Image (cartoon, grey):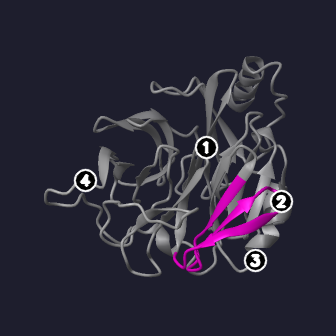
């Protein structure tokens, strides 16, 4: 029995009675990705992130500095701590108290750049995290996640037959939301789609809501109850809300967006400011009001947590909005 089969068997026993675990689909080897011109332009940090000087109240508190300098997606543990995914290699850290501590690394063969998506769900009172990479066209589940690590890490590969049928002939998973049955929904900036996969990615299908994204770059996704929200990395800066069936425009910001999160019922987005060459910041999607952040120039903010923790790719610094 392979290590993967053992992992799936252990998980099936662990979650018996609540999840019908299916076999993990065979993955594809990593290769060159086909992405539209400019689709990844704002993923490079364009400016230093710093706290403002003087006697004014700081815009944000520093939680930690990532050693590799590539913090991306963030999942809150508390206001003082968060799980932070290293975009460059898929390593999972706990960040807080000025320290970044490794709690998980990708399973063998699943280390890759492009780890953009991180989401979590509580299953039988235990936290499960899912990390996804467009570089490996898959990622891993972190089962029974805690500040000490994962009880198991189980690799997941998107189905090769599904990926080869995509418009770009490859899957390009970006932001993701995980459900309690371990199924998940991701957005794909290259294929301009929303995709839902069953647990362990045994099968995936394109969602009907994808039709709303034509001409845009859907890059991140957030969830509150049954409502989904998606952000747009094009200079139109659209935020959509709805479901896997249909999406409608909630707001347009006229600038490139990435990070997206609900804090209660309030939706926040990260404005990279790449298109306007101003200062990157968080914004309240409902009111359109910007939040004060420590950036003085455009910066790629890939992720926001439900506690408004965020970071700039390239700076390595993870903040808590004050």
Q: Which sits earlier in the primary sequence, circle 1 or circle 2? A: 1
Q: Which residue is mark 2?
A: 207
Q: Is residue 310 visible?
A: yes
Judging from the image, what secondary structure is the residue with disc 2 in? loop
In percent of width and height, residue 87 lies at: 48, 54
Residue at the far front: name it. 287
Query: Which numbered disc, 3 or 4, marks the residue that appears first in the sequence?
Result: 4
Mark 4 secondary-structure assignment? loop
User: Could you say which disc has been placed on residue 214 in the image?
Assistant: 3
Q: Residue at coordinates 50% horizontally, 75% vertically from top-left? A: 41
- Residue 27 at least partly seen: no
Residue to which mark 4 is pinned: 58
Mark earlier in primary sequence (2, 4) = 4
Q: Earlier in the sequence, mark 3 or mark 1?
A: 1
Q: CA distance from mark 1 to mark 2?
A: 19 Å
SS for tag 3? loop
- Reading the image, the residue beneath label 1 is 119
User: Is residue 262 shown above or below 229?
Assistant: above
120 within the magenta span = no
Structural distance between the alpha carbons of marks 3 and 1: 25 Å
Q: Marks 2 and 4, Cα distance to the nearest angstrom? A: 42 Å
Residue 228, position in %: x, y? Answer: 71, 54
Quadrant in which the N terminus appears: top right
**Does residue 77 lie above or below 133 as drawn?**
above
Instruction: Please identify the quarter of the rendering in which residue 116 is found.
Output: bottom right
Compare residues 252 and 96 and report the one nearer the observer: 252
Q: Give left or right: position of 123 versus 81.
A: right
For the residues labelled 2 and 3, say whether their Cβ atoms are less than 8 Å apart.
Answer: no
Name the one closer to the observer, 273 or 66: 273
Magenta highlight range: 228-255
């Amino acid at each position: 029995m392979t290590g993967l089969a053992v992992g799936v068997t252990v998980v099936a026993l662990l979650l018996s009675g609540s999840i019908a675990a299916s076999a993990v689909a065979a993955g594809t080897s990593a290769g060159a990705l086909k992405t539209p011109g400019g689709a990844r332009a704002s993923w490079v940090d364009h400016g230093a992130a710093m706290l403002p000087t003087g006697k004014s109240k700081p815009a944000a508190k520093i939680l930690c500095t990532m050693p590799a300098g590539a913090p991306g997606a963030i999942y809150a543990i508390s206001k003082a701590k968060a799980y932070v995914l290293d975009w460059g290699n898929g390593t999972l850290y706990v960040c807080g108290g000025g320290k970044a501590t490794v709690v998980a690394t990708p399973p063998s063969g699943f280390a890759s750049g492009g780890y953009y998506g991180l989401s979590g769900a509580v299953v039988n009172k235990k936290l499960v995290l899912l990390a996804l990479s467009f570089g490996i066209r898959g990622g891993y589940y972190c089962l029974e996640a805690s500040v000490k690590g994962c009880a198991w890490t189980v690799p997941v590969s998107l189905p090769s037959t599904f990926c080869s049928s995509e418009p770009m002939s490859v899957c390009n998973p970006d932001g993701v939301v995980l459900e309690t049955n371990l199924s998940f929904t991701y957005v794909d900036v290259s294929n301009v789609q929303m995709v839902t996969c069953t647990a362990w990615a045994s099968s995936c299908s394109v969602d009907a809501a994808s039709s709303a994204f034509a001409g845009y770059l859907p890059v991140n996704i957030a969830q509150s109850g049954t409502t989904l929200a998606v952000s747009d990395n094009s200079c139109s800066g659209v935020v959509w809300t709805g479901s896997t069936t249909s999406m409608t425009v909630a707001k347009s910001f006229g600038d490139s967006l990435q990070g997206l999160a609900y804090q209660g019922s309030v939706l926040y987005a990260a404005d990279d400011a790449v298109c306007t060459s101003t200062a990157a910041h968080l914004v309240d999607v409902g009111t359109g009001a910007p939040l004060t952040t420590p950036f003085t120039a455009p910066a790629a903010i890939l992720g926001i947590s439900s506690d408004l923790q965020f970071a700039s790719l390239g700076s390595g610094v993870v903040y808590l909005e004050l």
